[in-house]
Image (cartoon, rainbow, N blue to C red):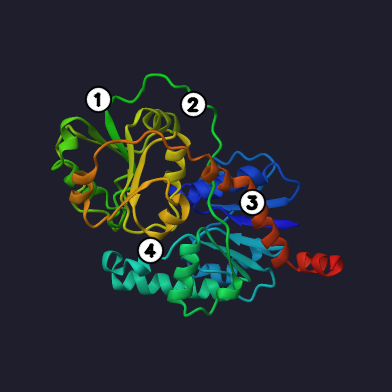
């Protein structure tokens, strides 16, 4: 099977992680895989068994409608793991991943024009796609809600997975946090609720014994918080950090807090679980879908109440059963099955086997 993977968001936070993890596994498979990249990203690409083809226009360019066809014409399936204007009038089947509908659901934050544009592009992508993958049951329900159940028959859930890392070396943290700290991971977009978490932390008793470490980028976002910095030594904004530094921060944290109003999945939950950290997170559907009753939930709109009612950090959690459910390897196998079912060669094989 010949697969074209659109990698134009390979360096974009969560979607970049998703794309890289799947490409890493595809690199060890016997399939013929072509990765579409911008010229800048192509120069940094290092998967030796995957072919790279450069593409000169962005994912929202009208050129995707007509000129993307030449990049995928020799493939059995075109996989686009993000929102993009799709190719039309192409005989190659399209498989799309939908991570969330945040700009539509949180349109008060993103603005009505952005919400309408996002919805319209997704509608075109859903129409053109032969199969649609969502990363959670929650996102599948969002598609059903916002598109009147029109595409329910073509939507499948294939969740994210936990990255396999080397066994952590439990040494003293190399990151300069000189006191006990509470950790959160997320950029400063309003739906992440990070700034509210920081402000209410400073009003709680916990700021007298702990610091709050916020890991995530706080630059370059159109919908970012206007007042993104708090001049207080009890709050640490790390900005972008290396995987090794993040590993150290997870190792030595007292508690992991995830306060989002809206997420499609919640990969940092799995990361925190892998370090056996006590976890407190928003009581939103995707978090409950992942974590069940293994974590503490709170109302993200009432963070003062959360800090007030937080009595201690329970470190006796064991998350192995949950972590075993979310692996990239298993998810890739599900994706490959969808690719085969979507492609013309896959339909032929399935018919023959039946």
SS for dot 1: loop
Residue at x 54%, y 58% (from the top left corner): 81
* Separation (CA) of disc 1 from disc 3: 41 Å
* Neighbours of disc 1 within 10 Å: few (<14), some (14-19), many (20+): few
**Pointer 3 or 4: first along the chain:** 4
Q: Is residue 130 left or right of residue 254?
A: right
How many tags in the picture?
4
Residue at x 44%, y 62% (from the top left corner): 100
The answer to which of 29 and 254 lies nearer the viewer is 254
SS for dot 4: helix
Residue 168 numbered tag: 2
Residue 209 numbered tag: none
Residue at x 43%, y 75% (from the top left corner): 146
Vertical placement of 91 versus 75: above or below? below
Residue 179 numbered tag: 1
Instruction: Locate residue 155: give its quadrant.
Output: bottom right
The residue tagged 4 is: 102
Vertical placement of 72 versus 252: above or below? below
């Amino acid at each position: 099977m010949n697969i074209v993977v659109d990698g134009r968001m390979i360096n974009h936070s969560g979607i970049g992680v998703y794309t890289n993890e799947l490409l890493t596994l595809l690199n060890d498979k016997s399939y013929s895989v072509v990765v579409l990249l911008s010229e800048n990203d192509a120069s940094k690409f290092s998967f030796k068994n995957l072919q790279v083809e450069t593409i000169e226009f962005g994912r929202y360019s009208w050129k995707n409608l007509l000129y993307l066809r030449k990049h995928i014409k020799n493939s059995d399936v075109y996989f686009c793991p993000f929102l993009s204007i799709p190719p039309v009038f192409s005989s190659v089947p399209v498989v799309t991943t939908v991570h969330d509908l945040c700009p539509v659901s949180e349109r008060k934050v993103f603005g009505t024009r952005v919400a309408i544009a996002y919805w319209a592009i997704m509608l075109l992508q859903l129409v053109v796609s032969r199969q649609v993958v969502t990363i959670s049951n929650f996102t599948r329900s969002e598609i059903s809600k916002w598109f009147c159940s029109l595409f329910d028959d073509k939507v499948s859930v294939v969740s994210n997975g936990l990255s396999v890392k080397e066994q952590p070396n439990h040494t003293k943290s190399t990151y300069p946090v000189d006191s006990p700290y509470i950790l959160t991971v997320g950029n400063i977009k309003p739906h992440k609720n990070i700034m509210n978490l920081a402000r209410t932390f400073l009003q709680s008793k916990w700021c007298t014994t702990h610091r709050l470490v916020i890991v995530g980028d706080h630059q370059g976002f159109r919908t970012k918080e206007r007042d993104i910095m708090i001049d207080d030594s009890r709050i640490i904004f790390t900005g972008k950090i290396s995987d090794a530094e993040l590993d150290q921060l997870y190792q030595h944290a007292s508690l992991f807090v995830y306060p989002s109003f809206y997420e499609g999945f919640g990969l940092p939950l799995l990361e925190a679980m892998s370090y056996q950290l006590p976890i407190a997170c928003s009581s939103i559907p995707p978090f409950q879908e992942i974590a069940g009753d293994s974590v503490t939930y709170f109302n993200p709109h009432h963070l003062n109440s959360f800090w007030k009612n937080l009595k201690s950090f329970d470190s006796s959690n064991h998350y192995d059963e949950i972590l075993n459910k979310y692996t990239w390897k298993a998810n890739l196998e599900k994706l490959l099955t969808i690719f085969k079912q979507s492609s013309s060669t896959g339909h032929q094989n399935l018919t023959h086997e039946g």
